[in-house]
Amino acid sequence: MDSQTPRLPPEIWLIILEMLPASFFQKNLRCLTVSKQWYDLAYPSFYSRIEFTPRVISRLVSRQSRRFNRSRAKLRETLRCLNIVLDGMGKSDPKNGCFDTVLNLGRLYAMLLDFKDLQAVSIQARWQNKKWKADPLQADYLPMRAIVPFVSFLENVKILDLDLRGTSVINGVTSDDQVHLCPFFRPLLNKLDVLRLRVRCICALAVLDMPDMGPLTVREITINLYLGEISKHNPKLNSTRRCSRAPNSWEWKSPVDEIRASLQILLPIMVEPKRAQMIHLAPTGEVHTWNAATDICVPDTTKKAIPLRSCKETKSGSCFAEPNPSEDSNLDEIVLI
């Protein structure tokens, strides 16, 4: 390195590089070219944490040249964490509307089958309309069939983080194309180490106990039912709703109780050290993190409480409904409602 660069051992530089945000080098590639020694240190860190936007995905799977072939070969050797960012993927988006992202996702998946060292996958498909976050869902935002391969067939992946707030887990362009993603989550508990979900609708099928599928391998499950401060006028839009039989139905039911019951059943059979938690919007307007091991909700003091004037609180003021002794709490019945 040049004389102005602090003389630190390579191990220290690697620690510093890991602390940089994923987009640090991606925004300015010249940061890689300070010197040859710096390039050798920074290059693996950069390539292992690229944000795969629609533009990056399109170039990676479509362009054919020696330079891109070398880049793909380098990715195959160094990529450990795949971060797919699909914000603003809609056709009306001037920056990304020209890319056939759904098709390119399929081509990217086929490419990833050769990435034997890939350990973590993160997919972020958030709000399409950033000016008004409560924009109604659009069927062509992200068909679930484009996500299914990443959820089901990447055998070496041990960490899966899905933030699909911008679309529904039950969607499709036509009725024949509709896919309900929740049943695809459950088999992941038998092969992943960590599963994190943040979706606009969810049901108990995502974390249902199914003994016939064999022992669990998962040690951490985090289900985030808080979607962010989307609306101050209709607080229900800030929280995940329960999956409906009718994909186009706007009936809002909270999945908090059934997800809580499912996680409590799964916790004893999870792998140590185990953690199962659910982040949700409390009746008080606070964001709470519920721990399945302690059955206690802890408020998140970093987020401002939003008064839920239009929502009815439970009589006890609890985050969860009081159990009714006259009703059977069997999860099979909960799922079929």
Image (cartoon, rainbow, N blue to C red):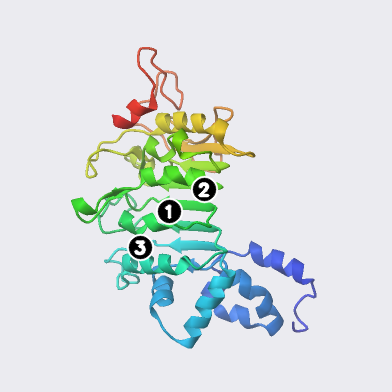
Give the quadrant of the C terminus: top left
Q: What is the number of the mark on residue 88?
A: 3
Can the viewer see residue 126?
no
Residue at the outermost top position: 326
- Residue at 25% over, 38% down: 245
The answer to whether 308 is drawn above or below residue 69 in the figure is: above
- Residue at 35% over, 16% down: 327
- Residue 330 x, y percent position in the rendering: 38, 23
The amino acid marked with disc number 2 is: Lys
In this view, the residue in front, 291 or 72, is 72
Return the residue at label 2.
191
**1 or 2: mark nearer the eye:** 2
Can the viewer see residue 60?
yes
**2 or 3: mark nearer the eye:** 2
Mark 2 residue element: loop
Q: Residues within 10 Å of mark 3 (few under 14, many from 20)?
A: many
Give the quadrant of the N terminus: bottom right
- Residue 264 x, y percent position in the rendering: 51, 29
Mark 1 residue element: helix
The amino acid marked with disc number 1 is: Val
Q: Disc 1, disc 2: CB below 8 Å?
A: no
Query: What's the distance in space between the residues labelled 1 and 2, CA to CA?
Result: 11 Å
Residue at the outermost bottom position: 66
Left or right of 184? Residue 30 is right
